[in-house]
Amino acid sequence: MDTKLLFQDAAGFQTPLLAVFAVDIAVGKDAEPLVALLTTSDSVADSAAKVLASGEFKATVGETLLLHGPNGLKTERLVVVGLGKAKGLSVDEVRKGAGTAVRAAKPLGVREMAIAFPEDHALDDEHLETLPCALLSRVLVEGAEVAEKDWDTYRSERKDRSVRSLSVIAKEAEKSTRAEIQEGFDAGVIVAAAQNFARSLVNEPGNVLTPTELGKRAAAMCSEMGLKCEVHSTAKLLELKMGAFAAVAQGSEQPPALIVMTYEPKLGKGEALAKDAPVLGLVGKGITFDTGGISIKPGDGMEKMKYDMAGAAAMIGAMQAIAQLKPRVKVIGVVCSAENMPDGKAYRPGDVVTAMSGKTIEVINTDAEGRLVLADGLHYAKTLGCTHLIDAATLTGACVVALGIVNVGLFSNDEGAWQKFTDATKISGEKFWRLPCTDDYKDQIKSHIADMRNTGANRWGGAISAAMFLKEFVGETPWLHLDIAGCAWHDENKPWIANGPSGVALRSILEWVRGYSD
Ligand code: BES
Ligand code: ZN
Ligand code: ZN
């Protein structure tokens, strides 16, 4: 989508569709909704006054109201988009609202549209706390761009419902505010493109996106963005003694890919990062298809296991945004990509493999392959000099059972890294819920014959057992583990995002990284 930012009066902007945001300013639990528009334009407010007075539109999140030929406005149509209650309004609702506006345009066949920048100062302070306008601007673009994507690339007869151009219309404001709005807008374009890139990778079927192909796409992105990228395969895995990662890969005709992307901040002449400056390691699970291997999965729903590389996609997308937003911190992305297949050469339950760290693992279940590839990825990232680690993985069904499809499972061995991440989520708007991984759970991964086993001793707390396993490979290094199994793929459409890949965790990881910029 061609997205631009214009400073002018929304009422005078000629467009097929203008979106304006509305909130419910009624107070009290049982009060009837009282709808107010987030605009200081009297013409826009007047044009919708009658229908809003009817009380038919409640301004709930995801709700829209369409008006044709609104009086006194240049736009052909006006769509009023609900953001919910004014009290407690946050940028998350604005992100969803912008998405809802774009997705409301699609069935109308509208190709060009505009969104009136939400003017929170249109309301009295008693209703609404002011939101920082740079952030408002950023989330507006993020929500709109993410909403624009539909996953119809594989249909031979595509119903083209794309919105090709979006104008964000902000009122002539002070110079300083303008600059802030512009800055947020520019960041939003970068972040949204990265998230959509990650989503498009996750959408690809397993026969198209093999580990080799994932490596090619990551390398192409890196060369475009000026990042260093190396893509290795079996020989390098064996040379590095990545016995766990190699074991997972050996059952497939498709060779594995170890993708290493490096971002070094460009500093001014004579400038240098502190000697003890952090180096951040972003490690992604990139199983391009997970059959379960010899411990094969049931057929029902197995087709979805193409999204078992969503953690890798989040890291590759995050690296793209990092290259453009240029934080002053070194970042290394490590993706462990393989296909988990049953075959004559496949690894089997009962096998003992030796990870790169030297630790031995008894394989109980070949479907618990994600932790095996990550074990080597995390250790490798440490050997590359990473001082802080974060991994993202569609790791366990147990995490979906525990947290459903709303919150990502979050695990950490370090309060400082966790705090920084929590701060990051306030900007990203993504939801995480911390689960424990204290040594009380260590018995779960005890093996009778090796240093550890790759599944829990019993069914209970499966997401935690997986985290405990990973923890063995990070040692003392501050580390965050994101189990995105429940949130990386939406089965259902929402008013602000199409069903399919969500691109979850990318924005939070990116913001976490920016939190270390010196
Ligand atoms: N990729 C799956 C986890 C998964 C499940 C992701 C559902 C998305 C949705 C992972 O490799 C896996 O199969 N884990 C097993 C672990 C078990 C064998 C200990 C699981 O969760 O059943
Ligand atoms: Zn599996
Ligand atoms: Zn898996």
Image (cartoon, helix red, strand yellow):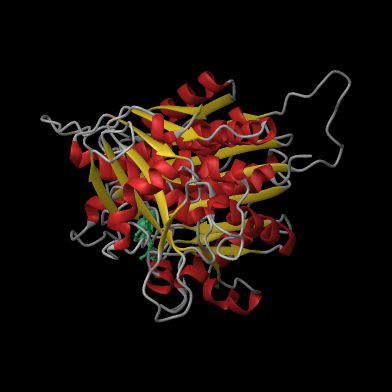
Location of the C terminus (image quadrant): top right
Q: Residue at x 73, y 45 (%)?
A: 516
Res 102 → quadrant: top left
Res 143 → quadrant: top left
| Figure check: 68 above or below 63 | above
For the residue pair 460 and 44, the one nearer the viewer reads as: 44
Q: Residue at x 29, y 65 (%)?
A: 55
Q: Position of residue 292 (x, y in %)?
A: 31, 56
Q: Is residue 111 visible?
A: yes
Which image quarter has ligand 3?
bottom left
Location of the N terminus (image quadrant): top left
**For residue 448, side relative to residue 293 (left or right):** right
For the residue pair 348 and 379, the one nearer the viewer reads as: 379
Q: Residue at x 49, y 31 (%)?
A: 235
| Figure check: 43 above or below 395 | above
For the residue pair 273 and 165, the one nearer the viewer reads as: 165
Q: Is residue 290 visible?
A: no
**For residue 332, side relative to residue 399 (left or right):** right
